[in-house]
Amino acid sequence: MRYNSPLADLPVEFVGSFPDPTHRLTPVLPEVVTLGRSNVGKSSLLNAIFDRPLAKVSGSPGRTALLNVFRLPTLYLLDLPGYGYAKVSHSERARYGRLVKTLIEQRTTITGVLWLLDIRHEPSVDDLAYAQQMEKRQLPILVALTKADKLPHGQRLSRLETIARQVGLPEDQVQLTSCLSGLGIVELGESILAVANPSEAT
């Protein structure tokens, strides 16, 4: 289904996959990081925003252990591996954790973070830890609450308010989304583009 996201018709180039979360990219452009737990629906959401299979939707989440970089005309999209996946070895989970933690703490070129949280679940220990790290860095964050279609309309706003409070963000930085209904897809595309053109953001 096409949702007319402003990113749908833009050229996207896969730059590469990097084990070093501080890998420098040239030319220098604004960088948007996508972050979220395994099973949060990140690949499906990215594919909906770009209206193409940008990210592989896998039946085995948490398998991506590298920093995947895509270039748009005016920015880079940095797709991080999902964190918190239980069905991998302890050493693999630790490696994923180090990659994400190092990027948040040390990458100085981040312009914004698209952080995905499942609207149906309470923020995990990992979620809250990353919230603190991003707050410490004062990184601009937009939360996409995924799978909003799984809840009745009457419950969605209250869940948004609760989760915003739990992760310490204002409600206007939290967006309801659904890959099935298209809820929030256009707005997310507009927000990503606005990172590269902040003077045009409304």
Image (cartoon, grey):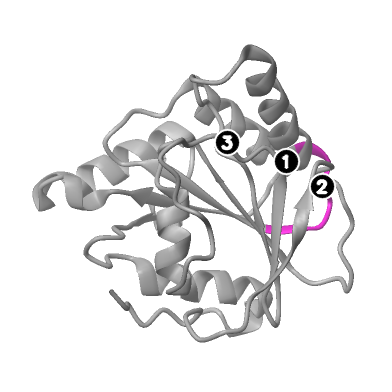
* Side (left or right) of 185 relative to 13: left
| Range of magenta residues | 105-111
Q: Is residue 196 magenta?
A: no
Query: For the residue labelled by badge 2, is the local secondary structure a helix, a strand or a loop?
Result: loop
Q: Amino acid at mark 3?
A: Arg
Residue 190 percent location from the top left of the image: 48, 76
Distance, label 2 to label 1, CA atoms, is: 6 Å
Tally the numbered discs.
Answer: 3
* Front tag of 1 and 3: 3
Q: Quadrant of residue 48?
A: bottom left
Query: For the residue labelled by badge 3, is the local secondary structure a helix, a strand or a loop?
Result: loop
Which residue is at a point 64% across and 46% down the rendered structure image? Answer: 80
* Side (left or right) of 87 relative to 172: right
Q: Amino acid at mark 1?
A: Ile
Residue 34 percent location from the top left of the image: 58, 52
Residue labelled with disc 2: 107
Q: Are marks 2 and 1 in contact (CB under 8 Å)?
A: yes
Distance, label 1 to label 3, CA atoms, is: 20 Å
Q: Which mark is residue 63?
A: 3
* Side (left or right) of 65 relative to 7: right
Asked if 156 appears above or below 124 in the picture, the reply is: below
Asked if 108 appears above or below 75 in the picture, the reply is: above
Residue labelled with disc 1: 104
